[in-house]
Amino acid sequence: MANSIARMRLITVKMPEIYVEGIDELVKIGRYSSRSEVIRVAIRDLLKKELWVKDREMR
């Protein structure tokens, strides 16, 4: 997994304005350094919860 994180791909995502405002607030208060970081962390946590952990449990 570490190798796949090192290689980044640019994607375009549409989302409701309220989400963007929330993301911007997290960056503004210094919790994250950028919008990209917020989104990467959120996706990583979702994948851990929904895919990677369940995958291990099935083995």
Image: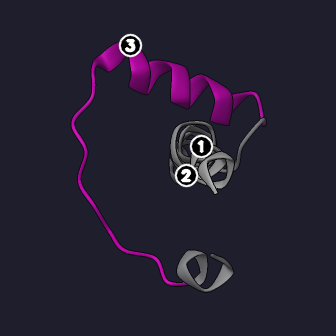
Asked if the residue at tag 3 contacts the one at tag 1, i.e. Cβ–Cβ closer than 8 Å, the answer is no
- Residue 11: x percent and y percent? 28, 61
In-image side of 30 versus 27 (left or right): right
Q: CA distance from mark 1 to mark 3?
A: 30 Å
**Which picture quadrant has residue 17?**
top left
- Residue 57: x percent and y percent? 67, 46
Q: In the rendered image, which residue does mark 2 sit on?
A: 40
Q: Amino acid at mark 2?
A: Arg
Numbered tag placed on residue 54 in the rendering: 1
Which of the image's four quarters has the C terminus? bottom right
Circle 1 packing at 10 Å, graded few (<14), some (14-19), many (20+), is few
Residue that appears at 61% across and 86% down = 3
Asked if the residue at tag 1 contacts the one at tag 2, i.e. Cβ–Cβ closer than 8 Å, the answer is no
Q: Secondary structure at mark 1?
A: helix
Q: CA distance from mark 2 to mark 1?
A: 20 Å
Residue that sits furthest to the top in the current view: 18
Q: In the rendered image, which residue does mark 3 sit on?
A: 18
Q: CA distance from mark 2 to mark 3?
A: 18 Å
Residue that sits furthest to the right in the current view: 30
Q: Earlier in the sequence, mark 2 or mark 1?
A: 2
Q: Secondary structure at mark 3?
A: helix
Residue 26 magenta-highlighted? yes
Residue that appears at 57% across and 52% down = 55
Circle 2 packing at 10 Å, graded few (<14), some (14-19), many (20+), is few
Residue 35 magenta-highlighted? no
Q: Secondary structure at mark 2?
A: helix
Q: Amino acid at mark 3?
A: Ile
Magenta range is 7-30
